[in-house]
Image: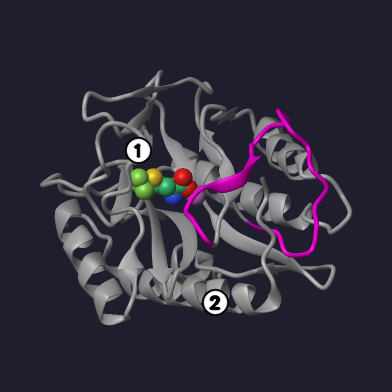
């Protein structure tokens, strides 16, 4: 069931999204070679607490093992749900960050992929195209149109560049909970509801330099590419209201592609 949001509720989700993006603006310059990913997690927990919010991912438990951190940090062939650890970021890594905040009961969700130091031309291209896939998807969000138009737009741009599209994970409704209906896949698949005023969802292309297939590591969370090629991930929370599409989280690419 898709839970539509009224204007006041969208105001609350927007606030949560703005706080999340403000956190990222401070965090992004710190994601550099030599930094341990666990230290990023501690910083994020502290920042969210000081902002009066709660980290939504911490303790999130859709399966056996609760997610143990406030942020997902997925490096190179890790696609999503990488767990912060003593691992140090290295020059040339593609570091995907994914975080959500609960602010006064309203949930936000945003992800970006950051280039640590200088990355190869191939990695830069994958990262740029994945970010473009996100915006192509958002451009396809039109009240009265159908949801899978978003999926077609994302898929079209990824395929035109010869990349693999992760099929096992997708975007989702968000706002009252982290994962609500509808599914927002990155290729046309499954239900195709009409896009309506009051819908709030996360669009999140996960795009691979190689094939689409992914595997899960023994930690029961980290998703990696089966062929161990690099993967990128970009995500915004968007809302449809008064027949207009609004990106509730804020653009961060100007802090990444310097
Ligand atoms: N942002 C992720 C998503 O959109 C959620 C991460 S799952 C968690 O699905 F367990 F890490 F919270
Ligand atoms: Co999400």
Instruction: Name, please, the residue furthest toward the left.
Output: 86
Of tags 2 and 1, the one toward the viewer is: 2
Which residue is tagged 1? Answer: 76
Above/below status of 15 relative to 133: below
Q: Earlier in the sequence, mark 2 or mark 1?
A: 2
Colour logic: one colour
| Residue range corresponding to the magenta coloring | 176-200
Nearest the viewer among 115 and 154 is 154
Find disc 2 in the rendering and name its residue.
Answer: 12
Q: Quadrant of the N terminus?
A: top right
Q: From the viewer's side, name the closer residue of 221 and 166.
A: 221
Mark yes or no: residue 95 visible: no
Q: Which residue is found at the position 71% from the left and 28% from the top?
A: 189
Q: Residue at x 83, y 47 (%)?
A: 194
Q: Quadrant of residue 34?
A: bottom left
Is residue 45 visible to the viewer in this orientation of the structure?
yes
Q: Main secondary structure of the magenta part?
A: loop
Where does residue 218 sit, x and y in percent of width and height? 22, 24
């Amino acid at each position: 069931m898709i839970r539509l949001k009224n204007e006041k509720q969208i105001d609350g989700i927007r606030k949560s999204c703005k706080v999340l993006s403000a956190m990222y603006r401070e965090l992004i310059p710190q994601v550099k070679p030599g930094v341990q990913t666990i230290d990023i997690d501690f910083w994020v927990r502290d920042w969210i607490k000081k902002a009066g919010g709660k980290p939504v991912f911490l303790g999130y438990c859709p399966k056996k093992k609760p997610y143990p951190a406030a942020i997902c940090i997925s490096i190179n062939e890790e696609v999503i749900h990488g767990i912060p650890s003593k691992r140090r970021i290295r020059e040339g890594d593609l570091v995907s960050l994914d975080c959500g905040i609960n602010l006064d009961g309203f949930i936000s969700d945003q992800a970006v992929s950051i280039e640590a130091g200088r990355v190869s031309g191939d990695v830069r291209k994958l990262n740029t195209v994945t970010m473009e896939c996100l915006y192509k998807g958002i451009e396809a969000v039109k009240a009265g149109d159908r949801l899978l138009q978003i999926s077609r737009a994302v898929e079209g741009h990824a395929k035109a560049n010869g990349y693999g599209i992760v099929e096992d994970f997708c975007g989702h409704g968000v706002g009252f909970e982290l994962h609500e209906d509808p599914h927002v896949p990155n290729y046309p698949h499954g239900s195709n509801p009409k896009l309506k005023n009051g819908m709030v969802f996360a669009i999140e292309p996960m795009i691979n330099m190689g094939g689409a297939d992914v595997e899960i590591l023994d930690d029961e969370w980290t998703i990696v590419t089966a062929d161990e090629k690099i993967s990128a991930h970009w995500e915004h929370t968007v809302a449809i209201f008064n027949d207009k599409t609004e990106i509730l989280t804020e653009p961060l690419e100007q802090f990444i592609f310097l």
